[in-house]
Image (cartoon, rainbow, N blue to C red):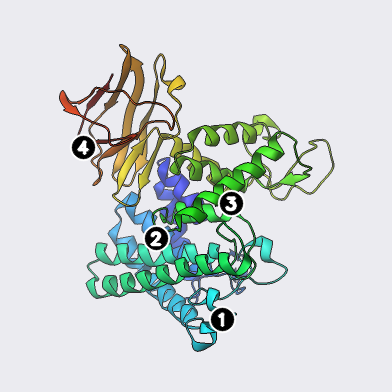
Amino acid sequence: GAMMAEGLNRLGHAPLSADYLRWFAPLVFDNGKVPCCADSRGADPVPENDSHGEFIFLAAETYRYTGDAALAREVWPQVQAAIAYMDTLRASTRTAEFQAADKRHLYGLLPPTISHEGYSDRPAYSYWDDFWGLLGYRDAAFLADALGETEAAARFRAAEAEFRADIMASIEAAARVHGIDWIAGAADRGDFDATSTTIALSPAGLIDDLPPALLERTFDKWWENFTARQENRQAWKDYTPYELRNVGALVRLGRRGEALRALDFYFADMRPRAWNGWAEVVGRDEREPRFIGDMPHAWISSDYIRSTLDLLVYERDRDHALVLAAGIPTAWLEGEGVGVTGVRTAYGPLTYNLRQAGGGYVLTLDGAVTPPGGFVIQWPTGETPPTTVRIDGRAASWTGSELAIPAGARRVEMR
């Protein structure tokens, strides 16, 4: 539900997310454990340790897009309880037992659960859980700031820093233990699961914290596997379109050509096309009778929405800049170009247009959105950016392939 809410917020439907938050918050257990799901019988007690961070993210995202401080205050007790519960979970692996050589790579992580369906055979120390948990600490501090809870904000940030250090140390240690050169899906398994690792980039915003070589190799390996399947160079039977999350990850990594090629592949597997959605499981042979999971599948739809919007605009966590058109190839800028009208951001509705004009390119902004880090244009990798740039008539320059644009700018000319 948290990821669906993010997609709804970015498309202008934040009131729906607020309604969902208002409904779900009372389902949090008294000890702060957030249920993995709920039905007519109430909250499900099965432990899944991604839920706690997801709930806090939902609360923070709802506040970012609605500014509803009263609702944030209403769910604040559950946010605090979820943090306290995660503190207890983390403490269980920050002991002398986990300092031993055979368990050091598990130190400080959330305990194993089956939140990841791939681990239903045996609970795992899934980094999926840890990335969501770390995001929960970050967003709890954000909410504490918004509500004037200064002591809580400081406490949450200290816990966030401690947890981040434990996770990053674990990722590197797990790579050594398992003899791998990518980020494992679970610390105890050493498995490959880039589609889960995407959460570290978005929404967790850890692109600058993850070990660079392991991060790069993770998505290199995913791309090798993807193209082998796409080009039928390896046998395959089916896949899950949760993979759409990789499109947004590739955009953030500056690999727009790969992101668009992957998106084209997934579009071909919308069955029937007129339904505008994906089944939970897509088979190679579309006529084969088979299990397809849920259809329509709202979680997968939210992955598509989030990744597609990332092509056009996404917020960079390190400086809260809005990165524009990072997934748009220059060929699309001919004629009327590419733009958005009123797409929602945490700083208000964004409208812009980027098009080819007069031997160069022109970006126009309506000036209504003023993100703290301004705006950024990232030129496609391997292409030379225009040499002359003027922002509202004043000369500007690129830093490598990146152009920083001040908040409030209205017109950028690149020739």
Residue in front for this viewpoint, 382 or 159: 382
Residue 36 shows in this picture: no
Give the Cα distance between marks 2 and 3: 24 Å
Name the residue type under label 2: Ala
Residue drawn at (41%, 67%), measured in percent from left and top? 164
Q: Examine the image and state in which quarter residue 43 appears.
A: bottom right
Disc 3 is placed on an element classified as: helix
Tell me whether circle 3 and circle 4 mark residues in contact (CB < 8 Å). Answer: no
* Residue for badge 2: 59
How packed mark 3 is, by other alpha carbons closer than 10 Å (few <14, some 14-19, many 20 or more), is: many
Name the residue type under label 4: Pro
| Quarter of the figure that contains the C terminus | top left
Give the Cα distance between marks 3 and 4: 34 Å
* Residue for badge 1: 101
Sequence-wise first label, 2 or 3: 2
Tell me whether circle 1 and circle 3 mark residues in contact (CB < 8 Å). Answer: no
Name the residue type under label 3: Thr
Residue drawn at (75%, 35%), measured in percent from left and top? 232
Sequence-wise first label, 2 or 4: 2
How packed mark 1 is, by other alpha carbons closer than 10 Å (few <14, some 14-19, many 20 or more), is: few
Q: Nearer the viewer, mark 1 or mark 4?
A: 1
